[in-house]
């Protein structure tokens, strides 16, 4: 019988939406006879995290071939933990379905002058990069967003003059690099009185078509830092931030008047990881430590924002480059969608449990957003 006390109601703030996507079991997990599914999706808003027997060897951690005592979280866990979110996607959910349920509604908002942000969180190998970038015949959210944005711009072209700019950067070992101009080296962050947090020297490009954007995305992805680990053969070792800037003004506005300005940020976070799962050492271990440091800073910001207190004394945005970049997405004037990716396998019990707790906490963030207008000036940033 289900434990009703473990159920959490789906109640996101006005501008903060939390979704969970459960990926299919991968080939490695399917080959393990002792690995079973520990996540059951009940409907499009609720899932059950249902652990196995306490003596299951897949729920014990190994070190140098020896079984170690299972962590406390595995000993005192409750059974049939129910989690509710704004949307839950099962293993067979298509890329298009995920896009239409999470991101497509806020693309229209961007063209109405509202800032928007989408970011994927989860352990390494949980499917974040597949959700955001996809591959081949299964394009991810970023590609589908660009296609939808230009489709809607085309529909409005007789009424509105629209300028689009984009930038693409990565945060790797707490250093920022321009993925569209990698020769520029490490870029500094600075605070601007008018624009807020700004990456000095980051190039902003003005594509003329969807094809131009796709070409830039492919170029940026080729420059992104990736290294194999035991947990993921194509593990992304950096946080990637793709930003789209949209400036609009009426066709008959002339050289003066006001312009609607909006920014859409799409983020593929590097995976949180445990050294025992990835078996990293040396440079890979240091990378993992920096990844976890920035994700811990992100978690601390979410905890502070989700505390429910009317006045929070301090939100620790400055604890990492990542949180400084995502400040507006988390607590600013922005419509935000968080997609938590997780594996259903008992082999990743701790990672999945921690991801679901993280996402459940984020539901308490409340964000109010409004349209931005400014006097028309040439230029996108």
Image (cartoon, rainbow, N blue to C red):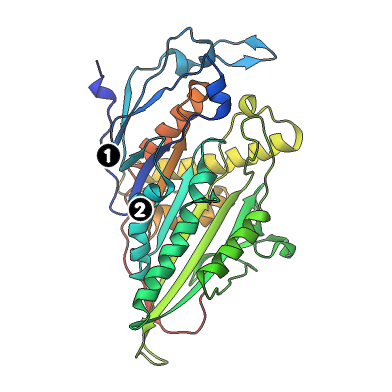
What residue is at 73 percent from the left and 30 percent from the top?
281
Above or below, 225 relative to 261: above
Instruction: Please tell me whether mark 1 sits on a helix, a strand or a loop.
Output: loop
Q: Position of residue 336 (x, y in %)?
A: 38, 54
What residue is at 48 percent from the left and 24 percent from the top?
345
In front of the other: 121 or 290? 121
Above or below, 257 relative to 364: below
Above or below, 218 relative to 152: above
Determine contact: label 1, label 2, CB under 8 Å.
no
Name the N-terminal-most of marks 1 and 2: 1
User: Disc number at residue 100?
Assistant: 2
User: Disc number at residue 244?
Assistant: none
Label 2 neighbourhood size at 10 Å, few (<14), some (14-19), many (20+)? some
Q: Residue furthest top?
A: 55
In front of the other: 167 or 139? 139
Q: Position of residue 222 (x, y in %)?
A: 67, 55
The reply to whether residue 247 is visible in this rendering is yes
User: Disc number at residue 10?
Assistant: 1
In front of the other: 167 or 215? 215
Which of the 4 image quarters holds residue 3? Answer: top left
What residue is at 58 percent from the left and 60 percent from the top?
217
Instruction: Please tell me whether mark 2 sits on a helix, a strand or a loop.
Output: helix
Q: Position of residue 118 (x, y in %)?
A: 43, 53
Above or below, 5 relative to 317: above
Which of the 4 image quarters holds residue 286? Answer: top right
Q: Nearer the viewer, mark 1 or mark 2?
A: 2
What residue is at 44 percent from the left and 60 percent from the top?
145
In front of the other: 104 or 10? 104
């Amino acid at each position: 019988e289900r434990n009703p006390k473990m159920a959490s109601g789906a109640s996101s703030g006005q501008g903060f939406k939390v979704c969970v996507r459960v990926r299919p079991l991968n080939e490695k997990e399917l080959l393990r006879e002792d690995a079973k599914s520990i996540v059951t999706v009940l409907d499009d808003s609720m899932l059950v995290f249902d652990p196995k027997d306490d003596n299951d060897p897949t729920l014990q951690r190994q070190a140098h071939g020896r079984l170690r005592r299972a962590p406390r979280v595995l000993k005192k866990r409750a059974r049939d933990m129910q989690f509710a979110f704004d949307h839950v996607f099962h293993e067979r959910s298509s890329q298009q379905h995920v896009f239409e349920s999470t991101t497509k509604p806020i693309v229209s908002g961007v063209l109405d002058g509202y800032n928007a942000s989408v970011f994927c969180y989860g352990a390494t190998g949980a499917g974040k990069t597949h959700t955001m970038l996809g591959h081949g015949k299964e394009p991810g959210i970023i590609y589908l967003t660009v296609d939808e944005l230009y489709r809607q711009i085309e529909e409005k072209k007789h009424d509105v003059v629209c300028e689009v700019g984009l930038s693409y950067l990565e945060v790797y070992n707490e250093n920022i690099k321009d993925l569209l101009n990698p020769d520029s080296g490490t870029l500094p962050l600075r605070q601007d009185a008018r624009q807020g947090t700004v990456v000095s020297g980051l190039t902003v490009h003005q594509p003329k078509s969807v094809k131009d954007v796709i070409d830039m995305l492919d170029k940026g992805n080729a420059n992104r830092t990736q290294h194999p680990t035991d947990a993921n053969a194509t593990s992304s070792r950096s946080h990637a931030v793709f930003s789209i800037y949209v400036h609009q003004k009426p066709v008959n506005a002339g050289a003066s008047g006001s312009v609607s300005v909006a920014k859409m940020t799409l983020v593929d976070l590097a995976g949180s990881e445990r050294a025992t799962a990835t078996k990293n050492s040396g440079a890979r271990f240091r990378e993992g430590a920096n990844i976890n440091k920035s994700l811990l800073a992100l978690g601390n910001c979410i905890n502070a924002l989700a505390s429910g207190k009317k006045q929070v004394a301090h939100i620790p945005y400055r604890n990492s480059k990542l949180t400084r970049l995502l400040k507006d997405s988390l607590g600013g004037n922005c419509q935000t969608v968080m997609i938590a990716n997780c594996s259903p396998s008992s082999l990743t019990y701790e990672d999945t449990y921690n991801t679901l707790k993280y996402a459940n906490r984020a539901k308490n963030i409340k964000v109010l957003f409004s349209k931005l207008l400014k006097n028309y000036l040439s230029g996108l940033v």
